[in-house]
Amino acid sequence: MAGLKEVLMAYYSRNDVRQAILKFGRNREVIGRYGFEGFAKRPDILEYENEILNLVKKGVTSFHCSEEIWENPLEISTDMDEDELDSLRTGWDLLIDIDSKYLDYSKVLAKLLIKAFEYHNIKNYGIKFSGSKGFHIIIPWSAFPEEINEVKTKDMFPEWPRAICNYLNSIIKKSLQEEVAKLEHNTSYKILDYEADKEVMPDIVLVSPRHLFRMPYSLHEKTALASIVIDKKDIDSFQPRDANPLKVKVRDFYPQAEKEEARELLLQALDHSKQKTREEPKKKEYASVKIKDLSPDLYPPCITKILEGLVDGRKRALFILMNFFRSLGQEWDEIEKRIDDWNKKNKKPLKQGYIKSQFNWAKRNKQILPPNCDKDHYKGIGVCQPDNFCGKIKNPVNYTVRKSRMTKKKTRKKK
């Protein structure tokens, strides 16, 4: 342990290392980690270079920060709802964490992602070694447009970064399998071709509110290596020994991006996300369903719960409601009225500009069902409260259609 402390002190005593960490941490949450014991209390920031060395003396071994950029990180609270976080957030970086059991597989993926970036006219990005067996690649916030279709980009975290990661996964998957298969000849890996892509696909766990990632030039507890910045031309030749904390040369991880140079990537990702939703299999019986006099008695429990008003998950709920009512043959003016009434019941209503943009997109595209009941959309926002009838259906629309038929059948029998 004494040896590790000596390495930590010697490394973090370097002015260039402390300056790099402090510079990157501006307007971010910055949290120290105490070895394997866990993280320090949140929220926290770094204001001065000397703070870093003082924290190391107290037992901090590494530094981690948010990919979200805040007006004042110290004002963040776990009690905040989505709107309060949106008002405090000034932007976000796209941070892709490449992790694999094997460094060579991570290299393959890093090169494919960079190729995808450059195909979408993105020239300014940063690459760094994670400190273990992967890489972090960043596209700075300044590369993204301020808004798309009157929706502020800063408020669409983590939805839009997730959409970008999913899109990148889809366009490189085949090449990834082919390139990794070439490495499979090395028997030390012992991974079959069809499993290879599962080992190295980008980890999108980082794309979540207030998630932390290891800062550039922070040390890694398990390997005692530094999270150093590298150039794309050095990916193939990179070896862990290059990240020896006592020999590293400090470089800037955060490039100066051209205005909106990531716009095309974001638009393609959003189109891909919507196309994927449109292509989800639909039951034929719902193709032209129209229920007259649609009453709340026919709603499944999840829809009833949503319509009572929500604190969190309002954007997902809007998507669910819009497609639920549309799939049951409701006219657009009626759907807008129902959703307007619902939005007023929310603790903090969604902004009208966001609702309008979602309606405009839906009107231009084919009808789709709301997500199936086994999707996380409902449990994730705390509205999945199944009744005895729910076990017989797969989709909220299916619930209402079947219940409507049963109600009509009972009415005919009474007559």
Image (cartoon, helix red, strand yellow):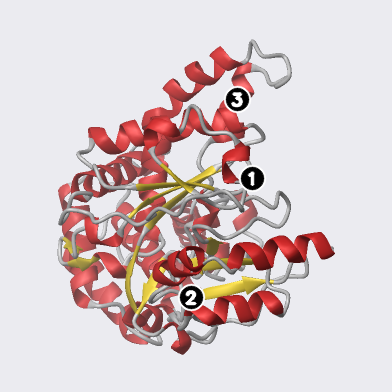
**Disc 2 versus disc 3: distance between alpha carbons?**
35 Å
In the rendered view, would you say 79 is above or below 232?
A: below
| Residue 132, label in figure | 1
Q: Measuring 70% from the left and 78% from the top, which residue is drawn there?
A: 57
Q: Quadrant of residue 34?
A: bottom right
Q: Which residue is outermost to the top?
A: 185
Q: Which numbered disc, 3 or 1, marks the residue closer to the eye?
A: 1
Q: Secondary structure at mark 3?
A: helix
Q: Is the residue marked by circle 1 packed among few (<14), some (14-19), or many (20+) residues within 10 Å?
A: many
Residue in the foreground of this view, choosing between 206 and 290: 206
> Upstream in the sequence, badge 3 or badge 1?
1
Q: Secondary structure at mark 1?
A: loop
On the question of residue 284 being in view, the answer is no
| Residue 57, label in figure | none
> Upstream in the sequence, badge 2 or badge 1?
2
Question: The residue under label 3 is which amino acid type?
Answer: Ala
Q: Position of residue 335 (x, y in %)?
A: 25, 67
Q: Position of residue 403 (x, y in %)?
A: 50, 58
Q: Is residue 49 left or right of 369 when viewed as pictured?
A: right
Q: Would you name the residue on which mark 3 appears?
A: 196
Residue in the foreground of this view, choosing between 108 and 334: 108
**Disc 3 versus disc 1: distance between alpha carbons?**
19 Å
Q: Position of residue 51 (x, y in %)?
A: 55, 82
Q: Secondary structure at mark 2?
A: loop
Q: Measuring 50% from the left and 70% from the top, which residue is drawn there?
A: 210
Residue in the foreground of this view, choosing between 383 and 399: 383
Q: Measuring 19% from the left and 59% from the top, which residue is drawn there?
A: 145
**Disc 2 versus disc 1: distance between alpha carbons?**
23 Å
In the rendered view, would you say 247 is above or below 49?
A: above
Q: Would you name the residue on which mark 2 appears?
A: 29
Q: Is the residue marked by circle 3 packed among few (<14), some (14-19), or many (20+) residues within 10 Å?
A: many
Question: The residue under label 2 is which amino acid type?
Answer: Glu
